[in-house]
Amino acid sequence: MVERSKGVRLDDTYAALAHPVRRELLTRLREGSGTVTGLAEPFDLSLWAVSKHISVLEDASLLRRRIEGREHHLSLEPAPLGEASAWLQTYREFWEGRLDDLEGLLRGSRGRRRR
Amino acid sequence: MVERSKGVRLDDTYAALAHPVRRELLTRLREGSGTVTGLAEPFDLSLWAVSKHISVLEDASLLRRRIEGREHHLSLEPAPLGEASAWLQTYREFWEGRLDDLEGLLRGSRGRRRR
DNA sequence: AGAATTCTCAACCAGATGGTTGAACGTTCC
DNA sequence: GGAACGTTCAACCATCTGGTTGAGAATTCT
């Protein structure tokens, strides 16, 4: 069994998301699968550099690769994104809480605030 | 004006989240602010190592530091987490879609599914 | 004043990351 | 068979990361 612990999985997912080229690759793959050359085309980077970014995404289980002859078709594997999002969601009350504070502050400025 | 572009901000946020010690620090800070020594205590790491992790979080604007005499009080700055989450949410349909596929598959196995 | 506490700095190290280029491999087309 | 295509490999380089240790600065306690 090669299952990785959830913590390590999150490490890899967030690390993979930390580069703009890789986020852009994921965004492009929402439109459907693509080949290495096709995905690399819009970037001002060597093909090999993009290929390495793709490998990082693949190692993080964010991409699936289907080899068909000489072409490699990459497609989105969204499950780890769901896990990364779930982790962040546990902080939701905090960033929303700050909005509540602001709201309270605004309310306070046009009428006395209790407490 | 030192405002950083949104893309760079996301780079820093995800990179900061990619280490288990830093995620744990954020989790601990949900309970309230803490000092460097206090935050470092549970980790089997040098104080300086933890101090550097704190700096990474601070550089990513995930922490605020209030210096009071010799003590530095760190507290959560959740806004960038909200932005990181918002980016991930744009993929929500994809990981939820896969669940729908599974659901459809299950439905199909106990009764014919239309189209 | 002197000691203890809190935190950062400087230097160092090993390994990862992000990029390049030229060569090589496997597949497809003529 | 040979050329073109799609992709990866190998080597190299600069920079970043995550850790260590010993020293130093500022603050507080007695």
Image (spheres, coloured by chain):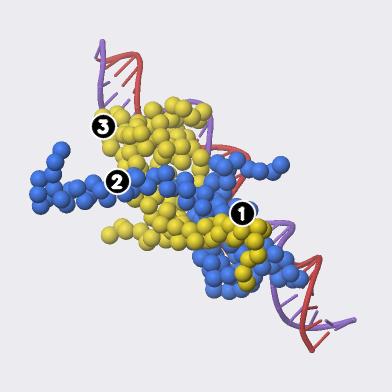
Chain colours: A yellow, B blue, C purple, D red
**Closest to the observer, B40 or A112:** A112
Q: Which residue is mark 2?
A: B97
**Closest to the observer, B15 or A56:** B15
For numbered disc 1, what is the local secondary structure?
loop
**Mark earlier in primary sequence (2, 1):** 1
Rendering coords of residue A109 (x, y %): 67, 58
For numbered disc 3, what is the local secondary structure?
strand
Figure check: C22 above or below B85: above
Figure check: B18 above or below B1: below
Q: How dense is the environment of label 3, judged by Cα within 10 Å: few (below 14), some, or many (20 and up)?
A: few
Residue at the spot 56% in from the left edge and 56% down from the top edge = A99
Q: Is residue A7 left or right of residue B41?
A: left
Q: Amino acid at mark 3?
A: Glu
Residue at the spot 63% in from the left edge and 66% down from the top edge = A113
**Closest to the observer, C29 or B9:** B9
Eye-nearest disc, 1 or 3: 1
Label 1–label 3 contact, CB within 8 A: no
Is there any visible trace of residue B98 in the rendered image?
yes
